[in-house]
Image (cartoon, rainbow, N blue to C red):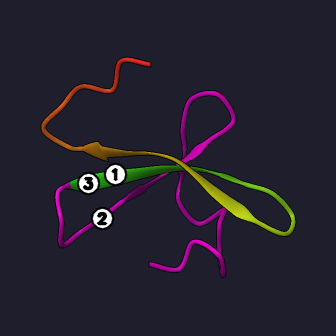
Amino acid sequence: MRLAVLPVLHRPGKYNTREAVMKVFPYTIVYRAAADSVRIVRVLHQAKKYFN
């Protein structure tokens, strides 16, 4: 996964985040991208509901 290279490639999420859906594993990575860093906020299993 290339979050650090192209952080704006993935879909926008809630609360100024972005969501990267993994194709091989059933997880979604929720992250915030700044000019010089990427901070992973949450890793969600796709079988669970995103309630926050």
User: Quarter of the image containing the N terminus?
Assistant: bottom left
Q: Are marks 2 and 3 in contact (CB under 8 Å)?
A: yes
Q: Are marks 1 and 2 in contact (CB under 8 Å)?
A: yes
Whether residue 44 is situated above or below residue 26 in the rendered picture: above
Magenta span of residues: 1-26
Q: Residues within 10 Å of mark 1 (few under 14, many from 20)?
A: some
Residue type marked 1: Thr
Q: Are marks 1 and 3 in contact (CB under 8 Å)?
A: yes
Whether residue 10 is situated above or below residue 46 in the rendered picture: below
Q: Residues within 10 Å of mark 3 (few under 14, many from 20)?
A: some
Q: Label 2, label 3: how many angstroms apart (C-alpha)?
A: 6 Å
Taking the image as shown, residue 44 lies to the left or right of residue 40, namely left
Task: Residue 22: give x, y in percent of width and height.
Answer: 30, 64
Task: Residue 23: give x, y in percent of width and height.
Answer: 23, 69
Q: Quadrant of residue 6?
A: bottom right
Q: Residues within 10 Å of mark 2 (few under 14, many from 20)?
A: few
Sequence-wise, the earlier of marks 2 and 3 is: 2
User: Quarter of the image containing the C terminus?
Assistant: top left
Task: Residue 39: give x, y in percent of width and height.
Answer: 64, 55
Whether residue 5 is situated above or below residue 41 in the rendered picture: below
Q: Which residue is mark 2?
A: 22
**Residue 7, magenta (yes or no):** yes
Q: Label 1, label 2: how many angstroms apart (C-alpha)?
A: 6 Å
Sequence-wise, the earlier of marks 1 and 2 is: 2
